[in-house]
């Protein structure tokens, strides 16, 4: 592996924090929580092993039982879950790293078997996504969701605000709002999934309203300087589409720029779900960079040299690595020193237990 130049390893300021380098561990669903969605010592070990990242963003964590879209993903809405996450934050802080919790509501990407009382999943409109949910008994096709009533939407905002409070109690350094990958906030944002005729549908301003309301609510807990937002321009995962994505995301990014966020986290469209769909140059950050003055994190199939290149081009300030961090807990040092990378095993991405989770080792060459 070619040893990159040093700009990837220059210090960077992220909100109130000074980080020693620009390598980020990206959020990755791993489905290793207990059945009651409580993280435990297994998660503490996993994140503690990967503290060579200056910033860790946790796996997507549901803000309420309604937000669940798969079995064994963690939550942040009970006292037991808060206590479980405290094990994780302690492990990360003991290793002198920073960790943000990603806040998540899947919306229509769920199934009645995952919902309280077997209820229908909720969404901006009653339009089903293609694909399937990972239930405790195996994959189950997505069904047509129930459109949220107008009076219910403030409750969604409150779910995120309460989760932000719980993340504060769990000892995190900040939170990231998951507005990407075809989940609830993304479903409201794009007109392929949002056909509402009220103040949350129709125009770009209306469709983006929920994302901004959630951002305001979360920032009221943390302060905007400790809040990040993740977006996925041109994403098609979860049957997502928009009639004018350039205008939609330009509006969103310009408005988010006014918040004074810790960062904006952008997924390049060459990644769909956890699969790299094309070996193409990143384009999303290049398009959005002129409209966001704050710290911009990019994710999507990067290695050391390509991360170095996008930083040199000025299109991003930090680079998030996902799958490579699974099998290389010391990824930062491997990139820094040009050490070989351990390949990951896709078959164990979502399996239970320690195999493929905490049994990868640091480089011993």
Image (spheres, rainbow, N blue to C red):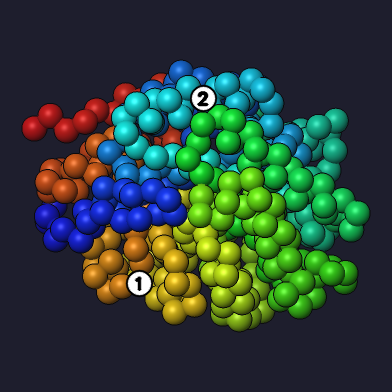
Quadrant for the C terminus, please.
top left
The crowding category of the residue bearing disc 1, from other C-alpha atoms within 10 Å (few below 14, some 14 to 19, many at least 20), is: many
Of callouts 2 and 1, which one flags the residue occurring earlier in the amino acid sequence? 2
Q: Give the percent coordinates (x, y) of residue 37.
A: 62, 26
Which residue occupies 24% across, 70% down?
312
**Which residue carries the number 2 mark?**
86
Q: Quadrant of residue 208?
A: bottom right
Q: Is residue 315 visible?
A: yes
Residue 321, can we see it? no
Image coords of residue 339 (percent x, y):
13, 43
- Between 261 and 181, the one lying in front of the other is 261
Left or right of residue 228: residue 332: left
Q: Nearer the viewer, mark 2 or mark 1?
A: 2
Mark 2 Cα-neighbour bin, 10 Å: few <14, some 14–19, many ≥20: many
User: Is 166 situated above or below 20?
Assistant: above
| Local SS, label 2 | helix
Q: Position of residue 38 (x, y in %)?
A: 60, 23
Observer-nearest of 288 and 117? 288
At horizontal 64% and vertical 64% (from top left) the residue drawn is 240
- Residue 315 is tagged as 1
Task: Name which quarter of the figure residue 114 lies in.
Answer: top right
- In which quadrant of the rendered view does residue 83 lie? top right
Viewer-proximal residue among 130 and 337: 337
Q: How many marks?
A: 2
Q: State the image coordinates of residue 185 (x, y, percent, origin top left).
A: 68, 57
In the image, is residue 164 above or below residue 256?
A: above
- Distance, label 2 to label 1, CA atoms, is 35 Å
- Contact (CB < 8 A) between labels 2 and 1? no
Left or right of 218 on screen, residue 315: left
Q: Residue at x 39, y 25 (%)?
A: 91
In this view, the residue in front, 255 or 149, is 255
Quick one: SS at disc 1?
loop
């Amino acid at each position: 592996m070619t040893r990159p130049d040093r700009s990837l390893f220059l210090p960077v300021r992220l909100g109130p924090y000074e980080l020693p380098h620009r390598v980020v561990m990206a959020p990755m669903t791993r489905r290793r929580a207990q059945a009651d969605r409580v993280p435990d010592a297994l998660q503490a070990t996993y994140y503690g092993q990967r503290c060579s990242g200056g910033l860790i963003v946790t796996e997507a964590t549901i803000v309420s039982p309604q937000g669940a879209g798969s079995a064994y993903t963690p939550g942040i809405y009970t006292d037991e879950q808060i206590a479980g996450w405290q094990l994780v934050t302690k492990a990360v802080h003991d290793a002198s790293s920073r960790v943000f919790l990603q806040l998540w509501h899947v919306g229509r990407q769920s199934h009645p078997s995952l919902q309280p009382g077997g209820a229908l999943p909720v969404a901006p409109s009653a339009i089903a996504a293609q694909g399937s949910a990972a239930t405790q008994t195996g994959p189950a096709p997505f069904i047509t969701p129930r459109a949220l009533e107008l009076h219910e939407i403030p409750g969604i905002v409150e779910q995120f605000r309460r989760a932000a409070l719980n993340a504060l109690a769990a000892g995190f350094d900040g939170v990231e709002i998951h507005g990407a990958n075809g989940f609830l906030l993304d479903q409201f944002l794009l007109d392929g999934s949002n056909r509402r005729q009220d103040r949350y549908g129709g125009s770009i301003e209306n469709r983006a309203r929920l994302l901004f309301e959630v951002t305001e609510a979360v920032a009221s807990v943390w302060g905007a300087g400790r809040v990040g937002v993740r977006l996925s321009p041109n994403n098609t995962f979860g049957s997502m589409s928009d009639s004018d994505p350039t205008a939609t995301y330009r509006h969103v990014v310009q408005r988010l720029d006014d918040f004074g966020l810790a960062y904006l986290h952008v997924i390049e469209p060459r990644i769909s779900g956890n699969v790299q769909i094309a070996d193409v140059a990143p384009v999303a950050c290049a398009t959005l960079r002129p409209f966001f003055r704050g710290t911009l994190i990019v994710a999507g199939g990067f290695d050391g040299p390509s991360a170095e290149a996008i930083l040199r081009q000025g299109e991003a300030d930090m680079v998030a690595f996902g799958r490579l961090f699974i099998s290389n807990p010391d990824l930062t040092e491997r990139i820094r020193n040009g050490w070989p990378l351990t390949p990951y095993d896709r078959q164990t991405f979502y399996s239970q237990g320690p195999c493929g989770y905490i049994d990868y080792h640091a480089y011993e060459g």
